[in-house]
DNA sequence: CTGGCTAGTTAACAAAAGGTTACCGGTAAA
DNA sequence: TTTACCGGTAACCTTTTGTTAACTAGCCAG
């Protein structure tokens, strides 16, 4: 009975799932932060380091977005008892699961750009 | 034969591609409209019929969203010279290409819902 | 003549998302 | 003592996004 097929869902549930995905991954900064953490996965990513690495983001936005990502289990937050107190952020193993999704957005976006260029 | 490898792109180009995809497919109504058109692909979809089918959408939003979708070649618009003038909208063949993308958003969203439920 | 159908448009507003500036308590170097 | 770095937060402002209600013009039935 149990195969690799997705659970049966209604049309409305699918639309909700899309809405959820876009809430968690959408917006101006979330995927940029995820990408930065993934590119620097072997380094210690403190708040300030991330802010310097993700171009243009303000402390307020970075703080909010990291909290959202942590709530959604995509990023972990660890306080370190150092002299000036530091906080380390890291992408979680579960967080890696977003990359196949973003890959399909990248592919479609690149293809779409070509398609629209042809039109003009 | 098509080359299945994507063109080489920079990190910034990938982020732009994601932004483009989300611009074209994001927002509250676009995918609901696309889905409705796809579910009723063998019917004649007039403006009013779509408005009745996509629950809650106002004339203003439907008008704007259909224009955006048409600009992006995802939907076609055909004026019919009927007694009260009618306009038929249809999803284009190219428009069908969004469904693999949305499918990955649906899968991830459904999985994420389970993941978050476990947390509580 | 009235009212309803067609496909929209316009203006005014509200809500959500994002940006700017200033500031906090703590540590430490100059 | 002043200065700067750390990880933020609060107040305020702007921009984007979406909602509501009123209105257009043409055609038709009662």
Image: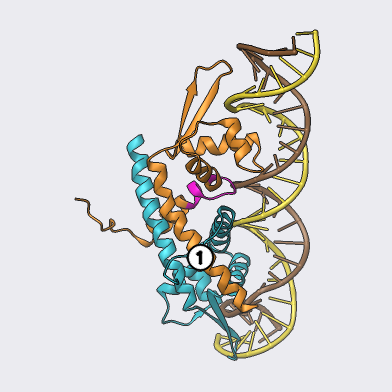
Chain colours: A cyan, B orange, C yellow, D brown
* Residue A27 belongs to magenta span: no
Task: Decide: is B69 above or below A77.
Answer: above
Q: Measured from the top left, where is residue B81 in percent x and y? A: 50, 17
The extreme left residue here reads B1
Q: Measured from the top left, where is residue A120 in percent x and y? A: 36, 34
Task: Decide: is C29 above or below A4.
Answer: below
**Dot 1: few (<14), some (14–19), or many (≥20) neighbours within 10 Å?**
few
Judge left or right: residue B57 versus residue A51: right
Per the image, the residue denoted by label 1 is A7
Q: Measured from the top left, where is residue B74 in percent x and y? A: 44, 40
The extreme front residue here reads A1
In depth, the one of A11 and B21 nearer the eye is A11
Q: Quadrant of residue C8?
A: top right
Task: Decide: is D3 above or below B108.
Answer: below
Q: Measured from the top left, where is residue A57 in percent x and y? A: 55, 63
Q: Chain of mark 1?
A: A
The secondary element bearing badge 1 is classed as loop
Magenta range is: B22-30
Quadrant housing the C terminus of chain B: bottom right
* Residue B27 belongs to magenta span: yes
Q: Residue at x 53, y 17 (%)?
A: B82
Q: Residue at x 55, y 23 (%)?
A: B86
Q: Residue at x 56, y 15 (%)?
A: B83
Q: Quadrant of residue B52?
A: top right
Judge left or right: residue D17 versus residue B1: right
Q: How many marks?
A: 1
Q: Quadrant of residue D26?
A: top right
């Amino acid at each position: 009975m149990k195969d690799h097929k997705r659970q049966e869902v209604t049309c409305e549930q699918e639309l909700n799932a899309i809405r959820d995905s876009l809430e968690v991954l959408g917006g101006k900064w979330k995927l940029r932060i995820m990408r930065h953490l993934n590119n620097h996965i072997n380094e210690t990513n403190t708040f300030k380091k991330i802010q310097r690495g993700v171009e243009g983001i303000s402390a307020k936005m970075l703080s909010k977005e990291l909290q959202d990502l942590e709530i959604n289990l995509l990023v972990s937050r660890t306080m370190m008892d150092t002299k000036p107190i530091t906080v380390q952020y890291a992408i979680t193993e579960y967080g890696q699961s977003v990359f196949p999704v973003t890959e399909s957005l990248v592919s479609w976006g690149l293809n779409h750009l070509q398609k629209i260029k042809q039109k003009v």
